[in-house]
Amino acid sequence: MNTLLVVIWATTLPGGFFWPIFPIAGWGIGLVMHAWDAFLRTEITDEDVDRELERMHHH
């Protein structure tokens, strides 16, 4: 998709403002967020759930 946007830009406005940077940057941000969620997020343990339930009952 990104390549298609760059091709459209290159064939319609060569040398003009590089507008495909906006969807490319948005896609990149989403990719980084997904990678963070998939590979770097810590698992939720039973202790975490119990602690949150206890906190909720005290409020």
Image (cartoon, rainbow, N blue to C red):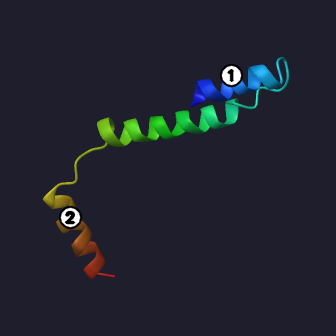
Question: Looking at the picture, which amino acid does disc 1 mark?
Answer: Val
Coordinates of residue 48 in the picture (x, y in percent): 21, 60
Which is in the foreground here, disc 1 or disc 2? 1
Question: 25 or 47: nearer the eye?
Answer: 25
Q: CA distance from mark 1 to mark 2?
A: 49 Å
Left or right of 13? Residue 54 is left
Q: Residue furthest left?
A: 46
Query: How many numbered circles does the render carry?
Result: 2
Q: Which mark is residue 7?
A: 1
Mark 1 and mark 2 lie on one chain; the one further toward the N terminus is 1
Badge 1: residue crowd in 10 Å (few <14, some 14–19, many ≥20): some
Q: Is residue 32 above or below residue 12?
A: below
Left or right of 45? Residue 10 is right
Left or right of 30? Residue 37 is left
Question: Looking at the picture, which amino acid does disc 2 mark?
Answer: Val
Question: 53 or 22: nearer the eye?
Answer: 22
Q: Is residue 46 above or below residue 16?
A: below
Residue position marked by numbered label 2 in the rendering: 49
Q: Residue at x 68, y 24 (%)?
A: 6
Q: Quadrant of the C terminus?
A: bottom left
